[in-house]
Image (cartoon, rainbow, N blue to C red):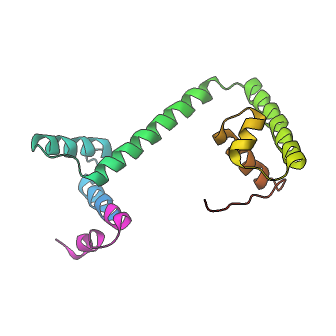
Amino acid sequence: MSEGEDKGQGSGGPMEMGMGMAKKMMAQMGKGGPNPMAMMQKMMGQMAEGGQALPPMMQMCMGMCSEMLTAIKRSTEMAAFASPELHGLFTEWLGATEDQAIRHLQENGATDLAGLAEALGIGEESAAYLLANLAKQGKITLRAEAL
C-alpha cells in the first residue's frame, strides 16, 4: 500500500476512511472509466458472490443514499406540478400561518413545538420550519433546553 493510501485509510475516523476510499475509487475510475454507480454495483456483486454481508458502514451509506434519492425524487415531482399560482398560494398561506404563530406566542408566551403545532393545526416538522423561518427573519428568538 502506498503512503497516500495508508494515510487515507489509517486509524482516523470514518470520514477520513471514507475520503480515502473515495479518492482510491476515483483514481481507479480514471478518464473514461466506469461511473460510481457501476463501481458500487460491482462491489456489491462481489460481496454477494462471496457470501459476505455488507459491512455496517456500507449499509449505513446505502440507507442514506436511498433516503436522499427518495427526497430528491419527491422534490422533483413536486416541482414539476408547482405552478406560479401554487407558489403564490403557498406564500400567502405561509404568511398567514406565520402571523398565527406570532399571535399564539404573544398571547400564550413561550411554548414547545408540539403545543405550537397543535395550536396551528400543522405537524411538528412544519411548526419547526415556521419557527426557523421566523427566527431567520428576526421576528422571534428561539430558545433550546436539554431534556
How many badges with numbers are in the image?
0
- Residue 84 image-quadrant placement: top right
- On screen, residue 3 above or below 61: below
Q: Quadrant of the C terminus?
A: bottom right
Tell me the magenta residue range.
1-18
Between residue 3 and residue 110, name the one nearer to us: 110
Q: Residue at x 28, y 60 (%)?
A: 21
Image position of 106 (left or right of 2): right
Between residue 44 and residue 140, name the one nearer to us: 140
Image position of 112 (left or right of 41): right
Res 31 seen here: no
Instruction: Give coordinates of residue 5: x percent, y percent.
Output: 24, 69
Which secondary structure is most common in the magenta stretch?
Answer: helix
- Residue 35 image-quadrant placement: top left
Q: Residue at x 9, y 44 (%)?
A: 50
Q: Quadrant of the N terminus?
A: bottom left
Res 123 seen here: yes
Instruction: Give coordinates of residue 105: x percent, y percent.
Output: 84, 48
Residue 29 highlighted magenta (yes or no): no
Instruction: Give coordinates of residue 110: x percent, y percent.
Output: 80, 53
Instruction: Give coordinates of residue 137: x percent, y percent.
Output: 80, 53
